[in-house]
Image (cartoon, grey):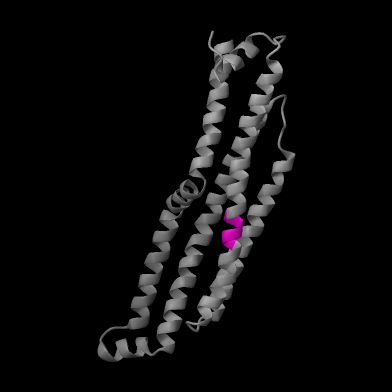
Amino acid sequence: METSIENIWKEGFLDESSLVVPQINDLYNQKSIHAVDGVKRMYRINQVVIVAMALVFPVVHYFVDALWQGFACSVLLLLTVWYNNSLARNIKTLHQGANSYDYLQSFNNWLKDVELKSKKIARLSYPLYVVIGLSTIWSAWNKQGMTQALQQNYPALNIPIIALTIAVIMVLLMFYFSIKIYKWEVRVMYGRVLEKLEDTIADMEKLKRGAE
């Protein structure tokens, strides 16, 4: 007789009085813990990376004579950290449910809600990063005399208007592609752990259906 995890789970579902129920619960708990802890671990790493970037940006911008832009970028990053932490606090209020499956479902629904809210933030923040970046470049070029040199070499061109037009186009493009970029970042950062979470839920649902 096979003694795989799937068979043990199925046996427990079929017979609530089975002696293997404690083992089933333990297997449920272990898989759930690994899946949820994986997401939480990557979240903490992501937060640390964002804070580190917030500390580094002013230093980098100082050396290109764009300190205020560096501070603006840092403020935006720290606001992102604050907002993420405010969402993370809601984990404590998640419905625990009667078993690990219920909790995983609740946790997965919370993640989807966070993703939806984060997409809205990305729509606003990503274009702002572009504005800050372009402002940094323009400020550095001005202080180095590059914009004046371009104007002198091409007097027929209105360099500020051209620069403003390019900036508006780039900001609009970032606004349009912000959600796609956000999804790509989530896949890079959380792809593996989210896939593990979804696989765990799918396994539990399959076993439940098989036990009915």
Residue 14 against residue 154 in the figure, above or below: above
Position of residue 181 measured from the top left corner of the image (x, y, whole percent): 44, 53
Position of residue 190 measured from the top left corner of the image (x, y, whole percent): 52, 46
Give the magenta part as a residue range.
Answer: 46-50
User: Which quarter of the figure is the N terminus placed in?
Assistant: top right
Total of numbered circles in the picture?
Answer: 0
Position of residue 36 measured from the top left corner of the image (x, y, whole percent): 62, 38
In the image, taking residue 13 as reference, residue 139 lies left or right, namely left
Instruction: Note whether residue 14 is visible.
Output: yes
| Residue situated in front as seen by the camera: 25 or 47 | 25
- Displayed quadrant of residue 200: top right
| Residue situated in front as seen by the camera: 66 or 189 | 189
Q: Residue at x 64, y 31 (%)?
A: 30
- Displayed quadrant of residue 164: bottom left
Dominant SS type (magenta): helix
Position of residue 40 measured from the top left corner of the image (x, y, whole percent): 62, 45
Residue 130 against residue 48 in the figure, above or below: below
User: Which quarter of the figure is the C terminus placed in?
Assistant: top right
